[in-house]
Image: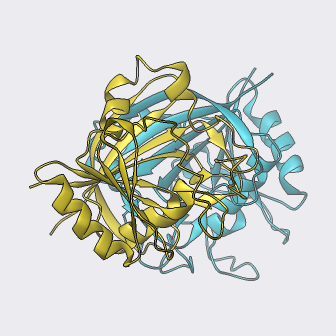
Chain colours: A cyan, B yellow
Amino acid sequence: MSKVTCDMAMSVDGFTAGPNQRADAPFGDGVDGALHRWMFDEPDANAAELAAITDAGAFIMGRNMFDPGRGDWDLDWTGWWGEEPPYHAPVFVLTHHEREPLERKGGTVFHFVTGGITKALARARAAAGDRNVAVAGGAATVNQFLAAGLIDELRLHIAPVVLGRGERLFEGVDRTELVQVGVSHTGLVTHVRYAPARP
Amino acid sequence: MSKVTCDMAMSVDGFTAGPNQRADAPFGDGVDGALHRWMFDEPDANAAELAAITDAGAFIMGRNMFDPGRGDWDLDWTGWWGEEPPYHAPVFVLTHHEREPLERKGGTVFHFVTGGITKALARARAAAGDRNVAVAGGAATVNQFLAAGLIDELRLHIAPVVLGRGERLFEGVDRTELVQVGVSHTGLVTHVRYAPARP
């Protein structure tokens, strides 16, 4: 059966972004590339982990990842990813505000889902077929999925930085036993894959 | 020159103990062995990392690690470690309450220091000579040292569990760039060693 995966770049103190994420600072105040240096400076050494991030048949993301810090929809805003986003699959965006689907080049279609994570997951599973569903972020969305026990494989990419503040992964997630299913590293990151411990 | 080291077992969500640490629950509510299974179930696979924890010429610990949840000294309390603690060196215990040194078998002598972390570190460095000084915990003490930039090598032992609450490492520590100096793992833990990035 297909799995629900989640890749998150995280500081050693558990933050996935700084505070005040917004259009001109998508990773929040003071973060810039701090969590993602391994992606940009070591793409070859991290090729397998990078490829895995977008290897899914459907994606789910929070409204704030699609469009940080905005209220109503600005219909001129089509995401961060330019003409051809890296997903090449349906992307279900959690939101409280209805919007028509947005089709981009290369097979990425953003669908806007108002029914919460359960509804989004059902639609993503149906769209993905035999392939995995990836929960793409941000932290608030991932934390909802973790709290509901809906992530089958959590892939943390731990960057060597203490951020001190920002969006915290695992906020609101209760005690959960995990199984460490894989560890690798380069000079700029430690990759750890976890699965929930199933009785 | 000798280094200031710190080994901490930590959950993936950044806790080093549960809440309410006390004499009958030294790692706090609900934690038991969750952070330390690698120590007890895989001592051979983790032999090098375990040996490194006590390879220092002097140690520093918080009052709460020596004697959790107590107010004034109970002079019958001599620590958790039985007749022969694993330190075999001077241990400087941070406290607000004076107490005579406590000598145990095998070379461990607990000294009680009321002058804060700077005073404790000066005494530990003097006692350690050419050897390293290890900050042994708990989180509140380590966080003071981290915030002051006094840890030269932080060795995290990340256990596959989300605790959800408890004593948080890095609380009160501001943005700090680190260098990842070593990564290893077994089935039950990921070891990551960090040094501060020095300009």
Q: Where residue A37 sits in the image (x, y, percent)?
A: 33, 55
Closer to the camera in the image, A118 or B12? B12
Quarter of the image for residue A176 reads top right
Quadrant, the N terminus of chain B? bottom left
Residue B188 visible within the image: no
Which residue is painted at 42% across and 64% down in the image?
A: B100
Which residue is painted at 76% across and 44% down in the image?
A: B30
Say above or below: A190 vs A174: above
Q: Is residue A50 rendered to the left or right of residue A174?
A: left
Say above or below: A39 vs A82: above
Say above or below: B192 vs B129: above
Quadrant, the C terminus of chain B? bottom left
Residue A84 visible within the image: yes
Quarter of the image for residue B19 reads bottom right
Say above or below: B162 vs B196: above
Which residue is painted at 21% across and 50% down in the image?
A: B132
Q: Where residue B135 sits in the image (x, y, percent)?
A: 36, 56
Q: Where residue A170 sits in the image (x, y, percent)?
A: 67, 54
Q: Where residue A121 sits in the image (x, y, percent)?
A: 81, 43
Closer to the camera in the image, B60 or A199? B60
Closer to the camera in the image, B128 or A155? B128
Identity of the residue furthest to the top in this view: B44
Closer to the camera in the image, A140 or B135? B135
Quarter of the image for residue A97 reads bottom right
Q: Could you tell me how many numbered marks the image carries?
A: 0
